[in-house]
Amino acid sequence: MAGNDVSDAFSCGNKTVTIRRSDAPGVPIVFLNEFEDDGATVWNACRSPAKPGTGGDPLPRCAPFSLVTVSGLAWDRELTPWPASATRAGQADYGGEARDHLRLLTEDVVPRALAALAADSGDGPMLVLAGYSLAGLFATWAAFNTSLFRRTASVSGSLWYPGFVDYVRDHKLAPTVERMYFSVGNRERKVPNRTMRSVQDDTIRIRSLVEERGVRTTFDLNSGNHFTGFARRMRKALAWTLRQEDVPGPRGA
């Protein structure tokens, strides 16, 4: 079943939106922010047969879903919630333009994608927002800033971002959010940069703060550093995020 399977694509500003449609009716729609990839890596990883992963453990099965990928992002600028100093020599500071990107996503990308998929955001399929690295940070932050996405997945997310733990502590989640996934690699904290070293502890803290509010969560500690096993990590994340078990109802907090 693996393959590119692109059913539609369109430009949105300076970004490219690529749609891959599941053959199954009424399935969830996953929105994925990517740096350059058009989503083929994640799509193929999630649709391939289950086989042993690292250490011989079988990779979990992903439920059917359609995938909408947004690529061509100004990564450090458009996925960060507020400005922050650069973490690498020669890198520009983080731009803090996530709110603008979220507006583009919710007001333009999502409606056009739903129209292309002949879906309705009201009584239609569940919408999920997922991402890796800074896109995982963006997905988690978005859960506090829009009611569109019922589930989010932060995969090796940059939850070390300055001030983000405090932000999660001090702000309310959208009442529609029912499930949030978190993961890091077990070597991600072993980096020279002091700001990034806190990523595992910060992710665990944020997961706990979210869970205290009645949202179902999980935390995976994967093997390797930040750049290890992207496709495998995304498959694990979406397999859990898309599960159809009972979840708590809408919350008022």
Image (spheres, grey):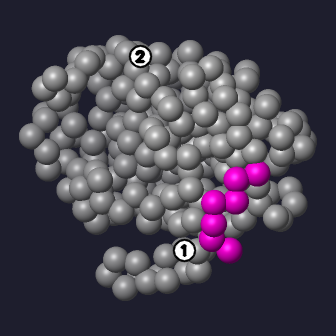
Q: Which residues are magenta?
A: 1-7
Secondary structure found at label 1: loop
User: Is 92 placed left or right of 64 in the picture?
Assistant: left
15 in relation to 51, above or below: above
Residue at the image position 77 percent from the left and 37 percent from the top: 113
The residue wearing badge 1 is 60
Residue at the image position 53 percent from the left and 66 percent from the top: 45
Q: Which mark is residue 96?
A: 2
Residue 139 visible in the picture: no
**Marks 1 and 2, the one that precedes in the sequence:** 1
User: Is 71 placed left or right of 111 in the picture?
Assistant: left
Residue at the image position 83 percent from the left and 40 percent from the top: 116
Q: Is residue 4 magenta?
A: yes
The image quadrant of residue 129 is top right
Where residue 29 appears, as percent x and y from the top left, is 72, 49
Where residue 222 appears, as percent x and y from the top left, is 33, 63
The image quadrant of residue 240 is bottom right
